[in-house]
Amino acid sequence: MTHFLHRKRGGRVSYAAIKLDMSKAYDRVEWKFLQGIMLKLGFNRSWVQLVMNCVTTVKYQIKVNGDVTEIIIPKRGLRQDDSLLLLEVNADSSRELNQILNSYEACLGQAINKEKSAILFSKNTKLEDKEELMNQLNIAIEGFSGKYLGLPCYIGRSKTKTFEYIKEKVWKRLQGGKEKLLSKAGKEVLIKAIAQAIPVYAMACFDLTKSLCEDVSSMIARFWWSQLDKENKIHWVGWDKLTKPKKDGGLGFRDLYSFNLAMLARQAWRMLQNPSSLCAQVMAAKYYPNQNLLQARPRDGISYSWRSILKGVQVLQSGIIWRVGDGRNINIWADPWLPRGVSRRVTSQQGSHVITKVSDLIDPTSGTWDLHLIDQTFNKEDVEVIVQIPIREGAKDTPAWHFDKKDIFLVKSAYQVVLENQARNSAHGGASSSSKNDQHRITFWKKLWTLPLPNKILHSL
């Protein structure tokens, strides 16, 4: 949305987005009022009682100068997130919006903090139209700064500057970890549970860039190798080795950028599974109106959030597989639908064959595979796999995650897919260890980590 407003430079119609700040919304809604409203609206008393139990059982304790106060039991309070409103910039819209906001305040007993609310105009908005709307709504701040719901409102050219707050948060937590007092086992817990968890929320929506992830990893590595009363922090083992799983000789720390890509893949998976969601509909209408998500490609002028999701789509394509239903949506030669190999695609050449959809390979009378046609079209290896694929009669073709038995996408498995792809690309066809040696190594590390010893001893080993 903010990307659209920043790029909207022409046309007669101009737009605006308004970020409303509620004035002490948490303190302004009494629970008796909330209970009365729910009963008046006709909610069942049992349901109302459940809701009231949720909001009235909250207790607080406040730390003042290091001392904890007595338990505080609040009598009112209802959290209200900041609302985001979109509208055309004209006299009718501003008048109607003003009436709606006044009615909202009168009905719910909440007040909008006009001093903290802000408005963002599209680039083609005339100066007089801006002033008229801001005066009518009594909003003085123009432009969105900072974050909205914990994420940057707008991603400019400098991604490093935009996500600088993540590095600051991580460094603050590491500095507060009292590195001189923590053992290696304690540092491992702090890194995994706190430091590497801080960027996760932003990773679900944006590509944090490889350079920023490397900077954060570098800070964490310095913290890990720091020693008591020693300024020089020697890194005895490379961070890339420490990010390997414990069964492979590492410590299981996250490769942050790989995890970032896995999180973006989850966002793409949600859009693929729920095409009727608001996010999926908006993105589809704007960026791939005549394609499906897996066919979408980057182009000039797209928002950074969409560009980030496309990186997740690339990861998704590494692990997606189509389960055959009616076969109408699966391209025989381009889509992954064979449950074998890395690509999960047919190895036969299309040649002069005119059939393109899997539905062409299904006998319309019996609803089973047309074995004669399949035998004429594909090589022996493909034929053996295709005839073993079950056809779900009466069902549509559905995308599934190949690396899960239940076909459900998991960030954990997507993370492993990213790591394996990177290892495969970095190998460049070089010699790899045999599966027998790999198994011996895995068995060794598993036995080591299961020894009945304290973690600080295991880390020293």
Image (tube, rainbow, N blue to C red):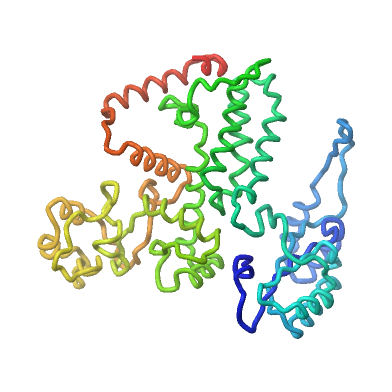
Q: Position of residue 49 (x, y in %)?
A: 76, 57
Q: Position of residue 290 (x, y in %)?
A: 41, 73
371 displayed left or right of 188:
left
Q: Residue at x 46, y 53 (%)?
A: 312
Q: Residue at x 71, y 68 (%)?
A: 120
59 displayed left or right of 1:
right
21 or 422: which is nearer to us? 422
How many numbered marks are there? 0
Q: Quadrant of residue 93?
A: bottom right
Q: Position of residue 101 (x, y in %)?
A: 80, 74
Q: Residue at x 80, y 76 (%)?
A: 131
37 or 171: which is nearer to us? 171
Whether 201 is drawn above or below 304: the answer is above
Q: Quadrant of the N terminus?
A: bottom right
Residue 147 makes an appearance in the image:
yes
Residue 110 makes an appearance in the image:
no
Q: Residue at x 82, y 59 (%)?
A: 25
Whether 422 is drawn above or below 445: the answer is below
Q: Position of residue 34 (x, y in %)?
A: 81, 63
